[in-house]
């Protein structure tokens, strides 16, 4: 047999493989070492043939030398077996070498491919963490429970009404119960609305972050800078943006918004919303059965486009108006925004809801749908609802360039209309009013034809108008589409006896299509006539504001609230970074001081004083051990965490205060910074597991009762002396208030003592005699001592009771005890070696020193644990809380306006706003002139 030792190695992936083979024949000790070279031009085959022949001859010669006779056929069979074994072994090593080479090559290709991938580590910081998703899902569950409670209360309300009706319960009781349930439902509805608003903002924020992340990923993937293509805006979109800017414009220069828009006014349920939907060719508003649905102004910008879609100004979602599901979502969103805009118990709001509707064949214009005029208020409305609607309607109609679309219900008596009087007050000559009579299909059956003719010719009402139109906005079915309604309208006017055969009005005065053409034509005519004048007015306003800024703030640039907020945000985050850079020694000092401030009162009042007044050293040690263990198991860990949190808060606030003293400090940020810090501190709480960790550490530390070296002993003595001196100062202040000022103070400051203070001085004199006679007196007075003191005072004509004597005794005895403790501390300063030799049997009583050494050790290990917790966890968690608060504040415009105030901020905001409006106006005017 052959023993083959193979040593295989590969130089490179594409070079030849070199094998070094050692062969040892089993019947001789000759070693054959042959190196196999790469096969080139048949040399390898020749070498292999030579090698096989030489070894066959060598084996044959060896066997013959031993006297073995091998038949020819057996020798050939043996050589055949040897060749098979050798070929099998060679094939194995070839496969092994190929596998190793292929693995190396594959590994290299994988590394090259991995290096070519973009770095995605930024996604870990950009995407929300698991804790945030958990909080989000928990809040959704809570919101679901709130909704369920509201539904249960509503069901209970219905059930209670049925029970009242069936059982004949008195009306007063049922009314009270109904009012109570109704108030609960309203409260729950308010809570649900607030939760919906909160998570609507959160979803919008997450959608925005998702879009930004997707854009960044595409940039990294393509490794190219994508240039944003500027989409050319339509004329009506540019004009709508100007109106959006003006909607939030508030100025002290009395610069009113006089740009044209179409104001849709009418009585409640007169069909004004239906007219607007007919013009927009989509049922985009929520419906109600006689109740008020329009609670806030809705600005609708109509524009022509290839697809029939709607979109709100502050979101990117487009609603496909050809799909019923999107229409339902749009109506729900409009209703949600209306209810969300109503705050503080109001019924209507001045907050504008802006949306754009685009579609084939739509006339370009801007319409504002207002709440309907009411004559009577219901019990569920606010007391000022009627006046608020009147004031809002007058405000929009008082714009001298606004086109008033006056909607009148044709199915009711004209004398019951409230809107015509308001329109006549704002536009007495009718130069910008278009009158629209709705529901004429019902009017045909109910009204007198002559009366309809007078209305549409402008002879029934004293008000005047540019034009009079008659429309049909429905046939009493909520699920009818706009196409069905418009077809019904066309068929009605073709076949109507009132409008077709008798010729009451001209054909161009009917149908919603003719109305939209007339309104659009008048709208653009008004725009072209007034836009230049409005642009000049804003130029003058901008000049005045810039002049005032230069006079008041010549060295400052005009920074608005958003820019100031970003600057304040950067400064706050810089202070958070500074907080993480505080040295360990400073943290130890701050935490130690705060811990002793929190713990000192308990140590003295509940541990040291009761144990020291027990009477013997053994009882002192036993009582100390019991009280310390109870304290460490219960209140000490929580108090320590509280001290750590207050130390962290104090250090952060001190950093903010030091930043105020910098030479480049801007006090305009002070109110905002204080609000952010207060809110972050209010939200932040220490980790719960820290209490359990501290409990274990503190219990183990308190088990050690032996002072290890002289240095620790001296530190404990000093700690005891300082603590006792602090308590002595507090006790002296108490005695000073109780007994009045001393002789020198009375002489120098012209002060005197009261009668009660004189009486207490007399009591103190008797008590001092007792302490002088018995230096080791117990903490309380005996009955005989109280009687003796009272009788001695009676001889001096001082009448006091026993409670009065005890009240005086308590601070007097405390001062006496503290003075003795201070004296013992001085005696124990040099008694360390005596303590180490005699231990508890030491002649000098130093148990109080050992107690304060144990307290000192607990404070040290607790402070060290809290410092590590602050540096490693709590500072970072506070950083996250501050960032979360800043993100919330950045989205809350009302809060920013409340926190960033002052003339400088107001003037800068106004100037920036006027510049934006002027620039948009000039851009619109240029496009308008090009269209001409």
Image (cartoon, rainbow, N blue to C red):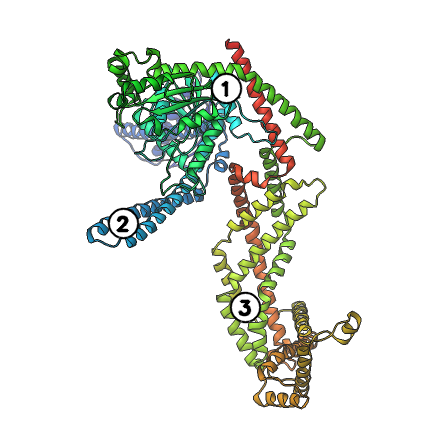
In the displayed structure image, the side of residue 94 where residue 894 appears, left or right = right
Residue 9 in sight: no
Task: Give the mark, 3 or 2, whose residue is nearer the N terminus.
Answer: 2
Q: How many marks?
A: 3
Label 3 vs label 2, nearer the camera: 2
Circle 2 crowding by C-alpha within 10 Å: few under 14, some 14–19, many from 20: some
- At a point 51% along the width and 40% down the height, the residue shown is 888
In the displayed structure image, the side of residue 901 where residue 410 appears, left or right = left
**Label 2, label 1: how far apart the Cα atoms are:** 52 Å
- At a point 69% along the width and 27% down the height, the residue shown is 547
Q: Position of residue 82 (x, y in %)?
A: 32, 30
Circle 1 crowding by C-alpha within 10 Å: few under 14, some 14–19, many from 20: some
User: Residue 55 appears in which quarter of the rendering?
Assistant: top left
User: Residue 886 appears in which quarter of the rendering?
Assistant: top right
- At a point 27% along the width and 17% down the height, the residue shown is 487
Q: Is residue 170 above or below residue 125?
A: below
Q: Which residue is mark 3?
A: 702
Circle 3 crowding by C-alpha within 10 Å: few under 14, some 14–19, many from 20: some
**Label 1, label 3: how far apart the Cα atoms are:** 76 Å
The residue closer to the viewer here, 833 or 592, is 592
Q: Is residue 493 above or below residue 551?
A: above
Q: Position of residue 666 (x, y in %)?
A: 67, 40
- The N terminus - image quarter: top left
> Are the residues at dot 1 and dot 3 in contact (C-beta closer than 8 Å)?
no
Label 1 vs label 3, nearer the camera: 1
Tag shown at residue 156: 2
Q: Is residue 157 above or below residue 111?
A: below
Q: Position of residue 806 (x, y in %)?
A: 59, 81
Q: Which residue is mark 1?
A: 238
The residue closer to the viewer here, 716 or 591, is 591
């Amino acid at each position: 047999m052959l023993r083959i030792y193979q040593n295989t190695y590969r130089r490179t992936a594409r070079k030849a493989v070199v094998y070094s083979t050692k062969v040892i024949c089993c019947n001789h000790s000759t070693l054959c070492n042959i190196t196999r070279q790469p096969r080139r031009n048949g040399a390898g085959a020749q070498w292999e043939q030579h090698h096989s022949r030489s070894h066959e001859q060598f084996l044959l010669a060896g066997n013959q030398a031993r006297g073995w006779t091998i038949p020819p056929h057996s020798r050939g069979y043996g050589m055949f077996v040897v060749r098979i074994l050798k070929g099998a072994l060679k094939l194995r090593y070839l496969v092994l070498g190929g596998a190793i080479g292929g693995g190396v090559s594959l590994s290299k290709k994988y590394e090259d491919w991995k290096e070519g991938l973009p770095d995605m580590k930024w996604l870990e910081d950009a995407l929300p963490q698991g804790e945030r998703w958990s909080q989000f899902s928990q809040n959704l569950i809570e919101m679901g429970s709130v909704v369920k409670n509201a539904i249960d209360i509503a069901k209970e309300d219905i059930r209670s009404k049925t029970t009242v009706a069936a059982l004949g319960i008195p009306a007063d009781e049922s009314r009270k119960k109904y009012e109570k349930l109704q108030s609960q439902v309203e409260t729950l509805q308010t809570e649900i609305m607030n939760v919906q608003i909160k998570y609507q903002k959160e979803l919008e924020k997450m959608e925005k972050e998702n879009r930004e992340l997707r854009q960044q990923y595409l940039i990294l993937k393509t490794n190219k800078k994508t240039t944003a293509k500027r989409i050319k805006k339509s004329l009506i979109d540019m004009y709508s943006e100007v109106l959006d800017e003006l909607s939030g414009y508030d100025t002290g220069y009395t610069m009113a918004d006089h740009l044209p828009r179409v104001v849709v006014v009418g009585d409640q349920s007169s069909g004004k919303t239906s007219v607007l939907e007919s013009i927009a060719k989509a049922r985009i508003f929520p419906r109600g059965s006689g109740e008020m649905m329009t609670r806030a102004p809705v600005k609708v910008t109509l524009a022509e486009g290839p697809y029939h879609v709607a979109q709100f100004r502050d979101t990117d979602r487009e609603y496909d108006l050809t799909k019923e599901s999107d229409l339902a979502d749009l109506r729900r969103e409009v209703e949600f925004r209306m209810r969300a805009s109503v705050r503080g118990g109001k019924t209507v709001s001045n907050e504008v809801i802006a949306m754009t509707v685009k579609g084939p064949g739509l006339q370009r214009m801007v319409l504002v749908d207002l709440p309907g005029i009411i004559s009577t208020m219901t019990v569920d409305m606010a007391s000022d609802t009627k006046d608020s609607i009147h004031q809002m309607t007058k405000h929009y109609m008082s714009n001298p360039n606004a086109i008033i679309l006056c909607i009148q219900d044709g199915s009711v008596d004209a004398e019951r209309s409230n809107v015509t009087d308001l329109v006549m007050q704002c536009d007495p000559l009718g130069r910008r009013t278009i009158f629209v009579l709705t529901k004429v299909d019902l009017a045909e059956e109910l009204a007198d034809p002559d009366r309809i003719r007078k209305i549409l010719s402008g002879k029934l009402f004293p008000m005047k108008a540019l034009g009079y139109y008659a429309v049909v906005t429905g046939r009493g079915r909520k699920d009818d589409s706009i196409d069905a309604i418009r077809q019904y309208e066309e068929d009605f006017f073709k076949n109507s006896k009132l409008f077709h055969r008798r010729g009451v009005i001209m054909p161009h005065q009917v149908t919603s299509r003719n109305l939209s053409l007339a309104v659009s034509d008048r709208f653009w005519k008004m725009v072209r006539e007034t836009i230049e004048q409005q642009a000049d007015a804003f130029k003058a306003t901008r000049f005045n504001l810039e002049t005032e800024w230069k006079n008041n703030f010549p060295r400052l640039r005009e920074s608005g609230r958003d820019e100031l907020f970003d600057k304040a945000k950067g400064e706050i985050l810089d202070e958070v970074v500074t907080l993480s850079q505080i040295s360990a020694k400073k943290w130890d000092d701050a935490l130690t001081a705060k811990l002793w401030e929190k713990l000192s009162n308990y140590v003295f009042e509940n541990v040291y004083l009761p144990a020291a007044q027990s009477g013997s050293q053994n009882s002192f040690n036993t009582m100390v051990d019991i009280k310390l263990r109870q304290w460490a198991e219960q209140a000490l860990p929580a108090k320590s965490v509280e001290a750590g949190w207050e130390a962290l808060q104090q250090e952060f606030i001190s950093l903010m205060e030091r930043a105020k003293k910098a030479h480049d400090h801007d006090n305009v940020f002070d109110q905002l910074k204080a609000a952010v810090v207060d809110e972050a501190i209010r939200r932040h709480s220490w980790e719960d597991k820290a209490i359990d960790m501290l409990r274990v550490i503190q219990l183990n530390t308190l088990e050690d009762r032996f002072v290890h070296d002289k240095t620790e002993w001296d530190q404990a003595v000093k700690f005891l002396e300082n603590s006792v001196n602090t308590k002595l100062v507090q006790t002296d202040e108490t005695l000073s208030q109780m007994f009045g000022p001393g002789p020198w103070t009375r002489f120098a400051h012209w002060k005197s003592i009261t009668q009660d203070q004189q009486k207490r001085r007399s009591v103190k004199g008797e008590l001092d005699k007792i302490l002088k006679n018995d230096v080791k007196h117990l903490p309380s007075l005996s009955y005989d001592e109280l009687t003796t003191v009272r009788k001695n005072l009676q001889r001096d004509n001082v009448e006091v009771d026993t409670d009065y004597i005890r009240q005086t005794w308590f601070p007097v005895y405390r001062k006496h005890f503290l003075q003795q403790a201070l004296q013992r501390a001085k005696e124990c300063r040099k008694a360390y070696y005596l303590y180490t030799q005699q231990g508890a049997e030491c002649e000098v009583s130093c148990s109080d020193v050992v107690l304060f050494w144990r307290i000192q050790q607990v404070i040290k290990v607790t402070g060290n644990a809290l410092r590590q917790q602050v540096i490693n966890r709590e500072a970072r968690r506070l950083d996250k809380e501050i960032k979360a608060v800043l993100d919330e504040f950045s989205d809350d415009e009302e809060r920013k306006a409340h926190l960033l105030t002052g003339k400088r901020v107001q003037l800068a905001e106004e100037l920036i706003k006027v510049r934006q409006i002027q620039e948009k106006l000039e851009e619109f005017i240029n496009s308008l002139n090009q269209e001409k």
